Amino acid sequence: MGLRIALIQMDIAFGNPKKNYLMVEEKVRQAVDTKNPDVIVLPELWTTGYDLEAFDQIADPEGKESITFLANLAKKYQVYFVAGSIAKKSVAGFTNTMLIFDQSGNLLKEYSKAHLFRLMNEEKHLVQGNDDGLFQLGDYLCAGLICYDIRFPEWVRTHMFDQTKVLFVVAQWPEPRIDHWRSILITRAIENQCFVVACNRVGSDPNNVFGGHSIIVGPWGQVIAEAKDQETILSGEIALSEVDKVRQNIPVFTDRRPDLYRLK
Ligand SMILES: NC(=O)CCC(=O)C(=O)O
């Protein structure tokens, strides 16, 4: 059985969670009406954008408001949510945290961005996460990564030792490096022989223009669906059996030589 996926590639109102909740509610309704998805994916920091200076006022305490909002939508539409990431405020500080829900609205996983991106000042305002991004969507073992995390192949590979089949990436990736975005995502799919489902934002904030090009890549590196640089709902279907076929054809995981790798 395949998994139908809808990625909401959207603009984000800078520092305005109320407006973003309303926009997401409407876009999720449109995605359900037009794509009949099993899974809906949102971009990185969709409640606030990168208004880091204002996080003290606008980050969500313990993620409570976002969790209630997303759980209700997941339950209402009976969809899984890889609900992008939100700015979460807790005693430890602010985190860039991905939220995953099942079709009954249960929170399956929280993953906080492990690698903070200095070019966008994250290290000055956020604390990094220390947990893995693994979660299960039905039969599909998946991993979540947030934007800059994809530049670390060793972190992605760590998630693959559990036979992960789908990598979900949520992002606010600027347009000037959109070639890196595409190349890295296709490479991660080929080297890990898995599906890559990646949702970027579009539009701009005071510091960046964002490049879109949300994409679904198959385990052979084939592009299944790709958006341009405008708001859209991108959709595609993925089938687990394809991953097994590719891994049997070229058994990369069996042929690894960890005795030669000097990774720490
Ligand atoms: N929000 C991010 O982590 C952006 C990462 C990025 O732009 C990059 O080039 O890496």
Image (spheres, rainbow, N blue to C red):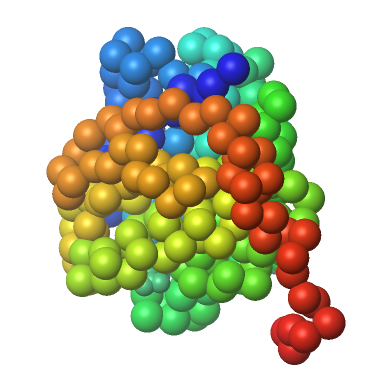
Task: Say which of 162 and 28 sits in front.
Answer: 162
Name the residue at 65% across, 68% down. 155
Residue 182, quarter of the rendered image: bottom left
Q: Quadrant of the C terminus?
A: bottom right
| Residue 54 place in picture, x, y as percent | 39, 63
Name the residue at 55% across, 28% down. 239
Vertically, is 113 above or below 126? above
| Residue 19 place in picture, x, y as percent | 29, 37
| Residue 88 place in picture, x, y as percent | 57, 53
Residue 81, quarter of the rendered image: top right
- Number of marks in picture: 0
Residue 243, quarter of the rendered image: top right
Task: Say which of 171 and 13 sits in front.
Answer: 171
**Taking the image as drawn, is residue 112 in sight?**
no
Image-based side of 122 in relation to 183, left or right: right
Q: Residue furthest right?
A: 259
Vertically, is 61 above or below 42? below
Task: Say which of 186 and 172 sits in front.
Answer: 186
